[in-house]
Amino acid sequence: MLQQLKEATDFIRRRIKHKPEVGVILGTGLGNRFVKAIKRQTIINYNVIPHFPISTVATHKGQLVVGEVNGKQVITMRGRLHYYEGYSMHQIALPIRVMKMLGVEVLLISNAAGNLNPNWKKGELMLLDDHVNLMPDNPLRGENYEVLGPRFPDMSEPYSQPLQKKLSAIARKKKINIHRGIYAAVQGPSLETRAEYRYLRTIGADAVGMSTVPEVLAARHCGMACCAVSVLTNDCNPDKPAAVKLESIVKVAGKAEKNLVTLFTGLIASL
Ligand code: HPA
């Protein structure tokens, strides 16, 4: 595995001019506007990078976009890899580890998620303060490579408190309404039943989605600071069930994209 990481890292390093400092992962329906904000872009398709998994979801592009945002060097995954697509957790962790080997210390993540909190509404944003991993696997399972990180990485602060404070301050300044809460990660791809919505509320989750946690586990393992924002694309009300459609998720995410980009570009400037 270390050899694969090295080959992928060397391949990317040869194609970029500067060492990236910030990694960004863009979720469902949340790609285009942020990518437009990246200056002096180098685009590398996943399918040419050795050992890189290839994104299979139609709404995800499968490119690394490397360049500059507010004076900082960023490397962006346009098109994330989901466990439900059939990738192993190790495959999902690979790009995160490659980012770390390239020099990235801060990882910003966006995702589309279902809203479980009865006081919140779809279309709003949630800053992740914590998560519950309900996926059946963990990217850190198996042999541990001490050069990457410890066998039993601490998870008392999966989402950096200083980054949360910075992002909240930017939201206040820009008058963007953002909640703070707990994200439950499920494997998908089927959406949740009403009984599952009730269960997820009972265990304290505010939002549910099919991503983010594997990347955060891999990132925390290798010591990167994480900050993640969910766009609440649909309401998950067990007493008022409504069919969830991908087109609607993508549409709601698209409407929230502007605020998300304001928050991320503002946070990058403040680093
Ligand atoms: N459930 C799981 N994942 C999701 C949802 C949802 O309701 N909405 C967007 N991603």
Image (cartoon, grey):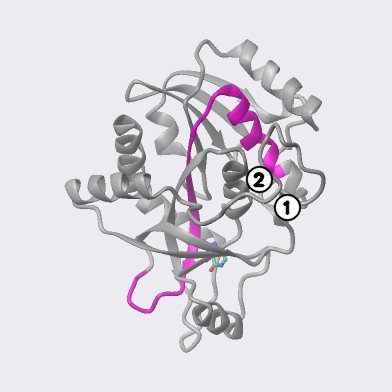
Could you tell me which secondary element the residue under label 2 belongs to?
A: loop
From where the camera sits, is residue 97 visible?
Answer: yes
Instruction: Report, in whole angstroms, how far the alpha carbon at label 2 lies from the one at label 1.
Output: 7 Å
Give the percent coordinates (x, y) of residue 265: 34, 35
Kindly identify which residue carries mark 2: 81
Q: Name the amino acid type tagged 2.
A: Leu
Looking at the image, residue 136 sits to the left or right of residue 206; the answer is right
| Region rendered in magenta | 92-121
Q: Choose top left, top right, bottom left or bottom right for residue 271.
A: top left
Question: Circle 1: is it few (<14), some (14-19), or many (20+) Cα within 10 Å?
Answer: few
Against 136, residue 15 (above or below) is above
The answer to whether marks 2 and 1 mark residues whose Cβ atoms lie closer than 8 Å is: yes
Q: Is residue 147 magenta?
A: no
Please tell me the numbered disc located at residue 61.
none
Kindly identify which residue carries mark 1: 85
From where the camera sits, is residue 59 visible?
Answer: no
Q: Is mark 1 within 8 Å of ligand 1?
A: no
Name the residue located 65 percent from the left edge and 34 percent from the top edge: 97
Name the residue located 77 percent from the left edge and 49 percent from the top edge: 88
Looking at the image, residue 88 sits to the left or right of residue 218; the answer is right
Along the line of sight, the residue nearer the viewer: 62 or 229: 229
Against 119, residue 253 (above or below) is above
The quarter of the picture showing ligand 1: bottom right
Q: Choose top left, top right, bottom left or bottom right for residue 232.
A: bottom left
